[in-house]
Amino acid sequence: MKVDIKTGDRTTGMVFKKTYPTVTLKVEFTEEEKAIIKQNRLEDVIVIERDCPADRDAAKSYDGQWNVRVSSLLYSEKSGLEHVGRSNGEIKGFIDQAKENLPKLKAMIEGNATEAEDESFEL
């Protein structure tokens, strides 16, 4: 799994221009990781919880709609997944969640690579 995180800005509007901070998260999975994800149905695992992007109408969205799932990362593997924030602090929070949760996702994928084995131990 290879991860790239890039920050930037996006300007919207023709007359009343607004500039928003952005972050693009690009995760490249190996073929083996993709197979494990598919085999174990990990596509719906939420990697990052996020609110409606700043350039979208929050009134037209529902709770959890904008969360980043494994399927979102697979779908956007080539171009990356962009999040438009309201502030630099929101972008930093997104990056912090990615740095915290992607290693957990990697461990989950690796844990699903092999079957559990019998074991005995004494307490």
Image (cartoon, helix red, strand yellow):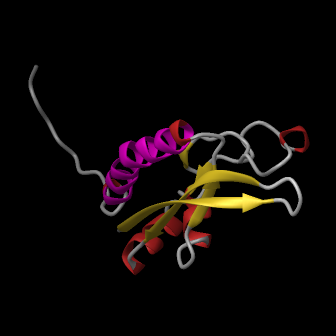
Position in image of residue 46 (x %, y %): 56, 46
Image quarter where the N terminus lies is bottom left
Main SS of the magenta part reads helix
Position in image of residue 101 (x %, y %): 41, 45
Q: Is residue 83 above or below residue 27?
A: above
Q: Residue at x 32, y 52 (%)?
A: 107
Image quarter where the C terminus lies is top left
Position in image of residue 21 (x %, y %): 59, 51
Q: Is residue 71 above or below residue 16?
A: below
Q: Is residue 61 above or below residue 5?
A: above
Q: Residue at x 54, y 60 (%)?
A: 8
Number of callouts in the render? 0
Quick check: is 105 in the magenta stretch? Answer: yes
Q: Residue at x 55, y 64 (%)?
A: 73
Taking the view exactly as shown, the residue that stands out farthest to the top is 123
Q: Nearer the viewer, residue 75 or 37?
A: 75
Left or right of residue 24: residue 67: right
Taking the view exactly as shown, the residue that stands out farthest to the left is 122
Q: Is residue 13 above or below residue 67?
A: below
Quick check: is 45 in the magenta stretch? Answer: no
* Magenta part of the chain: 90-110
Q: Nearer the viewer, residue 39 or 67?
A: 67
Position in image of residue 13 (x %, y %): 84, 59
